[in-house]
Image (cartoon, rainbow, N blue to C red):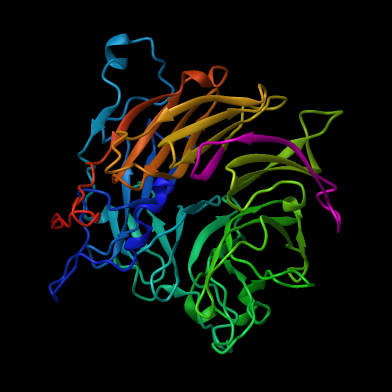
């Protein structure tokens, strides 16, 4: 059994008993999941800001939370610094337990947070989007102040983002929950597009309660304007069906936005009518010019994979002019499971009605592959792909120039009684250096990994752990509920 499953049976377990309010602590992270990074161009900050969603997975507290971490205030080593100082290196990882989260750097969200994404078009401060799988299935939007650390709920201008949060269930006109996006998990947006749409995946299928066959059910993506993600604007038109044109409905895990197509990864699903169901696809393409057109990749015809997790898409440069992006070609990276594999897929004729998919490589991964980040080394160079994996409690780095894994950086304490379970992943990439941030869901921290020279990714090291280790009650496997800080 994979390590990430150890706590999955705890969804219905709650440490909260009685009626006394139990707000989450601002002094530590509680089952951190989604993560995002921001540093404004020309900013005076050295290390930037990190935003972390606490999922409150075992319901010790009344809600989840999002915390803004000022990485300079935490005392994190400067970005891009090499490892020449042997005295400093001997102190890795630095244990930065004081998160310096003040009252304005902390907001409440619903429990069971999924991924997080950041929208930051020119002329406005960033906005964070976090799907939460609590009852009601919400997408919560949080505005970041110009200072990088002030957080305000976009949907109510307050600090409790549960108020007026956007439920993705039962929009006006829905019948039997359809359309709807219950169990939202993945989220994507074009970061710099002022007119961007936010795309949210759903891990559950919907349909008539009396359904007797799976064919009577449907699965949807939610499609919302980033500027106005409000309940009063939600209609049945904000949902895109994935089971159309003869394709079986299936739950989606993550979504990546290409030039014409959305690339959607598929996973095992949950239904009220039939319980758990196996994945019905591993990768589908949704035409953004006509979302009623959904294409299946048919990857399982060639690869014996069971389901998928993270997905990313990057542009490809022209063969005759490597300084220019080829709008008709894209590259997709997909994390498959069963067995765990990183698939690299080239999309030819990416603007056509029927693009061509070609798998150019497959790389075996440790068990529990969850999320990935693409680290570009610039024009004419192969990318680095960082992957979180709960099975070996590490972040793996794949170098596509060498065609192999070149580093596996441990992020936890390798404690069998409390696996670290790395899940969320964000990156700060500047010039020829990169820094990775991996949330360790099981022990309540964020691991920081530095790659000072992208020409030597094998030198990647864990340089810090942010936050105090999440305590666990060994008798029942849940975290130890602690009182919140002021």
The one nearer the camera, 400 or 323, is 400
> Per the image, is 351 magenta?
yes
Q: Tell me if 156 is positioned left or right of 483 in this view.
A: right
**Where is residue 4 shown, x and y percent of the image?**
41, 49
Q: Does residue 192 appear in the picture of this structure?
A: yes
The one nearer the camera, 69 or 406, is 406
Residue placed farthest to the front in the image?
1
- Quarter of the image where one finds residue 282: bottom right
**Where is residue 201 shown, x and y percent of the image?**
56, 63
Instruction: Residue at 13% x, 56% y: name it.
Output: 486
Does residue 468 sit above or below 190 in this rendering? Answer: above
Q: Tell me if 112 is positioned left or right of 385 in this view.
A: left
Q: Does residue 453 appear in the picture of this structure?
A: no
The one nearer the camera, 224 or 35, is 35
| Total labels drawn | 0
Q: Which residues are magenta?
A: 347-373
**Where is residue 27 shown, x and y percent of the image?**
20, 49
- Quarter of the image where one finds residue 315: top right
Q: Tell me if 33 is positioned left or right of 476 in this view.
A: right
The one nearer the camera, 363 or 186, is 363
Does residue 209 sit above or below 322 in this rendering? Answer: below
- Quarter of the image where one finds residue 221: bottom right
> Per the image, is 295 magenta?
no
**Where is residue 84 shown, x and y percent of the image?**
38, 9
Q: Tell me if 140 is positioned left or right of 223 in this view.
A: left
Instruction: Residue at 61% x, 59% y: name it.
Output: 196
Instruction: Residue at 50% x, 74% y: name it.
Output: 168
């Amino acid at each position: 059994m994979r390590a990430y499953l150890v706590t999955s049976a705890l969804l219905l377990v709650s440490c909260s008993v009685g009626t006394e309010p139990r707000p989450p602590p601002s002094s530590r992270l509680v089952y951190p999941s989604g993560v995002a990074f921001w540093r404004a161009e020309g900013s005076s900050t050295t290390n930037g800001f990190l935003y972390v969603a606490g999922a409150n997975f075992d319901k010790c507290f009344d809600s989840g939370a999002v915390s803004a971490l000022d990485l300079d205030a935490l005392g994190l080593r400067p970005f891009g610094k090499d490892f020449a100082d042997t005295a400093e290196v001997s102190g890795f990882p630095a244990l930065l337990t004081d998160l310096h989260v003040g009252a304005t750097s902390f907001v409440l969200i619903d429990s069971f947070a999924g991924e997080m994404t950041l929208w930051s078009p020119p002329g406005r401060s960033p906005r964070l989007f976090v799907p939460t799988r609590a009852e009601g299935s919400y997408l919560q939007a949080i505005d970041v102040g110009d200072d990088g650390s002030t957080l305000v709920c976009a949907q109510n201008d307050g600090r409790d983002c549960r108020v007026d949060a956007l439920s993705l269930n039962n929009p006006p006109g829905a019948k039997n929950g359809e359309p709807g996006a219950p169990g939202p998990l993945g989220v994507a947006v074009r970061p710099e597009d002022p007119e961007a749409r936010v795309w949210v995946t759903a891990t559950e299928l919907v349909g008539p309660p009396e359904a007797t066959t799976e064919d009577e059910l449907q699965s949807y993506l939610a499609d919302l304007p980033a500027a106005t993600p409000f309940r009063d604007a939600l209609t049945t038109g904000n949902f895109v069906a994935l089971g159309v044109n003869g394709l079986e409905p299936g739950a989606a895990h993550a979504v990546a936005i290409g030039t014409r197509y959305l690339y959607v990864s598929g996973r095992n699903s949950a239904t009220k009518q039939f319980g758990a169901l196996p994945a019905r696809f591993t990768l589908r393409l949704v035409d953004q010019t006509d979302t009623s057109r959904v294409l299946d990749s048919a990857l399982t015809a060639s690869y014996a994979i069971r389901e998928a997790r993270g997905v990313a898409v990057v542009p490809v440069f022209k063969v005759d002019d490597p300084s220019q992006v080829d709008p008709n070609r894209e590259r997709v990276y997909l994390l498959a499971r069963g067995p765990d594999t990183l698939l690299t897929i080239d999309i030819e004729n990416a603007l056509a009605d029927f693009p061509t998919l070609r798998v150019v490589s497959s790389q075996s991964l440790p068990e529990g592959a969850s999320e990935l980040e693409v680290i570009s080394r610039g024009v004419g160079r192969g990318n680095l792909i960082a992957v979180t994996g709960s099975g070996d409690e590490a972040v793996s780095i794949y170098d596509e120039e060498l065609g192999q894994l070149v580093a596996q950086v441990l992020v936890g304490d390798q404690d069998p009684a409390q696996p670290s379970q790395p899940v969320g992943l964000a990156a700060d990439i500047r010039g020829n250096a990169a820094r990775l941030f991996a949330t360790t869901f099981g022990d309540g921290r964020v691991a920081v990994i530095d790659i000072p020279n992208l020409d030597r990714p094998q030198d990647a090291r864990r340089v810090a752990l942010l936050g105090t280790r999440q305590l666990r009650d060994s008798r029942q496997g849940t975290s130890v509920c602690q009182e919140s800080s002021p």
